[in-house]
Image (cartoon, helix red, strand yellow):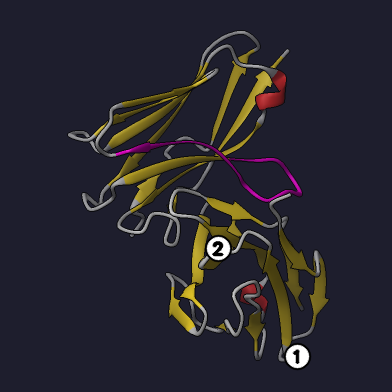
Amino acid sequence: EAQVTQNPRYLITVTGKKLTVTCSQNMNHEYMSWYRQDPGLGLRQIYYSMNVEVTDKGDVPEGYKVSRKEKRNFPLILESPSPNQTSLYFCASSSNTEAFFGQGTRLTVV
Amino acid sequence: DQQVKQNSPSLSVQEGRISILNCDYTNSMFDYFLWYKKYPAEGPTFLISISSIKDKNEDGRFTVFLNKSAKHLSLHIVPSQPGDSAVYFCAASWGTSGSRLTFGEGTQLTVNP
């Protein structure tokens, strides 16, 4: 079964404490992305990767890092989280015609 | 600037009637358009797509229409069912379609029994 798996599903953390949200896919896709969903703004792309070791900024990359050391994994790193990064995060793995999304990570930074 | 806009935050229709969700875009480079459906506590799931070389694509109860001259697309759901109640996102891309999707703000569709 095609899957995009994110962990954790829910996370509450404090300002400044580094965290990583993991994402893995089993579809052998080259493209992977991270999005955040905020009320009234839809989904905005944070970072994307077109292949192993190839990553690029999306529309809202500030405060985030990513890495793509292997095809199946694309972790999202917040080195020093701030309250404005409280959001719902989605990882996506894409073929040429559609993106498959994970179930989301609800992050709260206090 | 919002390149993909869904101007209606919400839409309410009766079961059995048609639901029409609208989406406008500004970037003429977009060549592929998709609709995603999202239930609470789940990730978005792909619903239907259309290439810019077409003006209509149909899949069962779902039809997407594209008007390139107006930079407008719409999703029609006929007949609407209560299980269709969800947030619908319009998305657009260009070039390598899957990797860079630009989403609209979403429209909450409620289908009343």
Instruction: Give residue A29's quadrant in the image.
Output: bottom right
Answer left or right for A4 relative to B105. Answer: right
User: Residue beneath label 2, please?
Assistant: A29
Image quadrant assignment for residue B60:
top right
- Residue A104 percent across, percent down from the top left: 71, 59
**Which residue lies most toward the front here?**
A28
The answer to if B46 sits in the magenta stretch is yes
Q: Give the residue at the far top of this rendering.
A: B16
Q: How many marks?
A: 2
- Chain identity of mark 1: A
Q: Residue at x 47, y 72 (%)?
A: A60
Closest to the camera, between mark 1 and mark 2, is 2
Q: Nearer the viewer, residue A106 or B76?
A: B76
Say whether residue A39 is visible.
no
Chain holding disc 2: A
Question: Which residue is labeled 1 in the image?
Answer: A17
Q: Secondary structure at mark 1?
A: loop
Left or right of residue B56: residue B113: right
Quarter of the picture holding the C terminus of chain A: bottom right
Residue lying at the far left in this picture: please name it: B69
Residue A52 visible = yes
The residue at 75%/90% (across/down) is A17
Q: Position of residue A80 (x, y in %)?
A: 66, 90
Asked if residue B23 lies in the magenta stretch, the reply is no
**Label 1 amino acid?**
Lys
In the displayed structure, does residue A75 sit left or right of residue B103?
right
When the figure is inspected, residue B7 is found, relative to residue B100, above or below; the finding is above
Q: Magenta residues, as a range?
A: B37-51
Q: Secondary structure at mark 2?
A: loop
